[in-house]
Structure formats: C-alpha cells, structure tokens
Amino acid sequence: MTGAFDLAIAGSGFGGSLLAMVARRLGLSVLLLERGAHPRFAIGESTSPLTNLLLEELAQRYDLPRLLPLASYGTWKRTYPDLVVGLKRGFTFYGHRAGEPYRDDPERSAQLLVAASPENEVADTHWYRAAFDEFLLREAQSLAVEYVDRVSISDLARCGNVTSLAGERNGRSVRYRARFVVDATGPRGLLSRLLELPEIPWDCLPPTQGLYTHFANVGRMAELAESEGAPYPPDDAALHHLFDGGWIWVLRFENGITSSGVAAEDWFADELRLEEGEPAWQRLLERFPTVRRQFAAAAPVLPFITHRRLPYRCAEVVGDGWALLPSATAFIDPLFSTGFPLTLLGIHRLGRALAEAWDTPAWEERLRQHAQSTRDEAEASAWLVGGCYAAFRDFPTFAALSMLYFTAASYAEMARRLDRPHLASQFLLRNQPSFRRALEGHTAATRTGRPPAPPAVYTDVEPFNIAGLCDPAKRNWYPVDLEDVVRGAAKLERSPEEVRQFFERMGWR
C-alpha cells in the first residue's frame, strides 16, 4: 500500500468500524488497522436507550440500513437471528453488606429496578462483542474499507499533511500513509503510547481495579430476591450487586454465556488480591452469600482478566493530523453503561466534521470542539460515578443519586426523539446549568461525607423528570409509563397531543 488514505483508524472494535463506515459513506478512503484478529473478546457490552438512539441516528444519517435493526431487541432478533444478543429491559441494582445475605424488606430499600422499555420488542441489548464487533467489521469491509489485522504499529511520523505509520505484520515490516489518524484502541491506546501523551488523574473518582470474564450456568437473582410484580424480569437487564468498595455486574447473553466481573476500589481490591484472578473471584463470592448462591453452579469459560488501573484520562484529545475517540480519551467505570453513548457521540461529532469541514479552514476548529466536548462529557460521567461509589455503602443514598443519571438519560432520549435536541445537547444535561449544578453539588457532597437527603435530589431533577422517577410510592420499582412523558410534555417544549401522536407513529403503547 503506497498511496495515502484519507483516514487511518487504529482499532476495529465497534467504534472504529462505525467511524470507518461513516467516513466511507462520505466518500473518504479508509484504512482500518487491528493489532489482533476477529473474533475476539472485548469488554463493554451493555447498551442503553440513548446508545441505541445514537446508533439509529448514525444508520439513518449515513445510509447504513443494515445497522438499523441493531437498535432494538425485537428487530435485531427478526433480522439477524444468528447474531448473538442479550435482552436488556432495564437497570437492576441490589445492595449488599459483607458477610450477610441479601434481605428484602417491604420498602425494597436495598434494591432498585428502572425499566428502559415497556416491552421486549423495543428493548435494549447486550452486545456479545466477539460476534457484534466482527459483524460491524464485515459491514465496513463491504463498503470498501481496507482492513489489516495482526499489525503492530511502532512509529508515527508526520510529514506535511500526511502521517506515516510504520510497524510489523507477520514478521515483515509494513508502512502505511494517511492524511488523518483516529485512535479507537481504547484507554492507554496506540497514540497515547507512541506520542507519549500525558495522563491526568481524576480527582473525583476513587482509584479502582477490575476483574472479569465470561461464565456459563449463572443463576438468576429472581429466584433469590423479591421479583413478583416487578416492572420486568430483573435478570433480563444490566444487573448490579453494590457493596462498600465496589460492585459486580451480571449481563446475560442468549447463547448461555454471562458476562460478569467486579470493579473495586483499591483498598478492597488489595484485600481480595484481585491480581490473582480466579482465586480472588472466589474470595469475593465468599464475602457476599447471596451472590455466592447465584454463582454456585457457574464456571468461567475464558481466563480471568485483571486491570490494575481502571480510571483513565488523556491530557490531549486532538493534535497535528490525529484525534482520539472518546473511548481512547478517557475511561470512567462500567457503571450506568456510559461508555457506549460517549463513544457514539464522538463518532457523531467527527462524522459531521468530516461531512462539513474536511479540507476546509474550519477543520481545526471542529476538532477543537470535538476535544472540548469529549473532555466535558467524560468529566460529567466522572462526577456521577465518583459520587455513586461514595454512596455504595448506603443504598438509599445511591438510589437517590442514580436519579441524576436516569432523569438525564430519559430526558435526553425523548428530547432527541421529539426533535428538541438543543434541550439535551450535552451528555448528562451538562448544557442545562441547573442540572449541572445539581449533579456536581450532590455528588461532591456525597464524596466528602455529606450526602444529600433524597428529597433534595428529587427536587433538583424535577424540571427534567419526564419518566415518573423519584416517586417514593413506587418503592424503587420504576416501570415505563408513556403517560408520564405525556404529563411532562411541556418540559420537552411539546404539547401532550404532540407527544401522543409521536407514540402512535412509533407504535409504542
């Protein structure tokens, strides 16, 4: 390959492949580089309504019709029945105390179920990344994206308006040339290493470590905790076990595999000796009897993977001839599944920049805007997650803080769907000054040992609460009720009749 591509993208996970497809639809030549080979294991598997809406918008804007069915569970199953998926009806949380079994009580004060959809047909999904990423890669190749796997890039050199990428593939030296390079390789990725980009620690996040793998034969919490009358089957969700010092995720796929792992603060990870892998996992289960029961018959199907440092933030997002995707700029935590929408928002920004400013004097300014938005959105996520970690030891405080996320997420989704994107132009409503103050104020107070009373949080989010959240009478079970959105229509600058007409067009009931 001697000619210069318009765009070289390092990393062929979902973000790299999606951006490659967008660029090809815009008429650019694209080189997609992969250090490994597909199919391969990847972490980050659980979507959300905003994730799927952003994917739907990409598919529509850039004429990628084969991606549209992936935006909801029902259309995915009908269109691609052989592509492994998991059903995600909502977010399920259980609070645990070390050494004690989980206990229900009449107020459900140690559990929280927040539905994301009224039925399976329009539900969210868990992406089985080995299959999903390979599917997206093949789609990119069908659009004439040039793909090279098993390549190790060891040197970058900028000369004029072209970057040379040199390295090795199958024992032979290789060199590629591109006018612009995008890093989609994740935290501490290719450009971070080769350009020696400095890392900035997060002061609002605790240092955390991770341990995870895939399992077979994981039990269901519906058999171990109250679930009769729940807004959805609690295991058909992103299920979280919370405790002082961290949390465990449980994500089910329909091939019998369950993704599970723990994100733990350093002090707790060191107690467990998390770096030892499976023995540490067993020690973790011993701490929490009900989780141990859920995993009594479970067996890992892949080796355990450990991460000594989960949070990450790169000091630079763009430079001369290059840019990072949000996934390569920062990593916060898997909590609330924020990584997918942040990456998709970045792809939207870069896609619009390529469409409107490529080869124009406005290009550098659009990159600067991408960098600022990427930093701001990561920071908002870090504020939220840092406050929630501090609240894990007290489940009612966590449940109250979580309303900041669920209020913002539901409001943002409906604002975009109802053609009012200016109301939620930034992630976690950072563009709304009152909401931003509430998020930063309540999470900072929690981190410094002064957690807010739940009613204070509920009052602050009320101007954006269009999903019937924050209602003590619901006792921590929140179904989807479309009439809540109708009643909140004015908050979205719409009339109740306009909202009802939208639901009729969508076929939502």
Image (cartoon, rainbow, N blue to C red):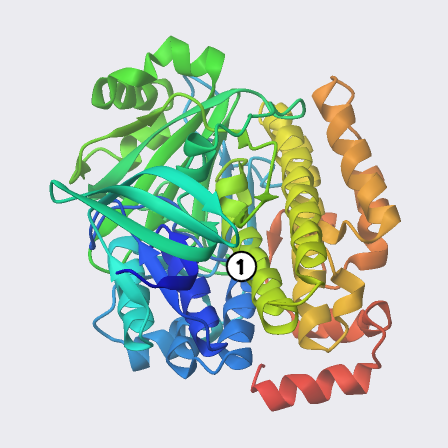
Q: Is residue 434 left or right of 377 when viewed as pictured?
A: right
x, y percent for residue 301: 15, 40
**Foreground residue, 360 or 481?**
360
Q: In percent of the image, x 54 and y 60: which residue is there? A: 347
In the image, is residue 452 above or below residue 221?
Answer: above
x, y percent for residue 147: 27, 61
Outermost residue toward the left in this view: 171
In the image, is residue 66 above or below residue 133?
Answer: below
* Residue at the disc numbered 1: 344
Q: Is residue 487 left or right of 31 when viewed as pictured?
A: right
x, y percent for residue 208: 48, 22
**Foreground residue, 433 or 234?**
433
Q: In percent of the image, x 65 and y 69: which residue is there? A: 481
Q: Is residue 268 left or right of 287 when viewed as pictured?
A: right
**Foreground residue, 243 or 76?**
76
Residue 292 quadrant: top left
Q: In percent of the image, x 56 and y 69: which residue is there? A: 53
Residue 379 quadrant: top right
Q: Is residue 459 left or right of 162 when viewed as pictured?
A: right
Residue type beneath disc 1: Leu
x, y percent for residue 483: 71, 74
In the image, is residue 451 above or below residue 256?
Answer: above
Element marked by disc 1: helix
Count up the numbered dots. 1
Q: For mark 1, does the 10 Å Cα neighbourhood hold few (<14), some (14 to 19), or many (20 or more) residues?
A: many
In the image, is residue 17 above or below residue 275?
Answer: below
Q: In percent of the image, x 74 and y 69: which residue is there? A: 421
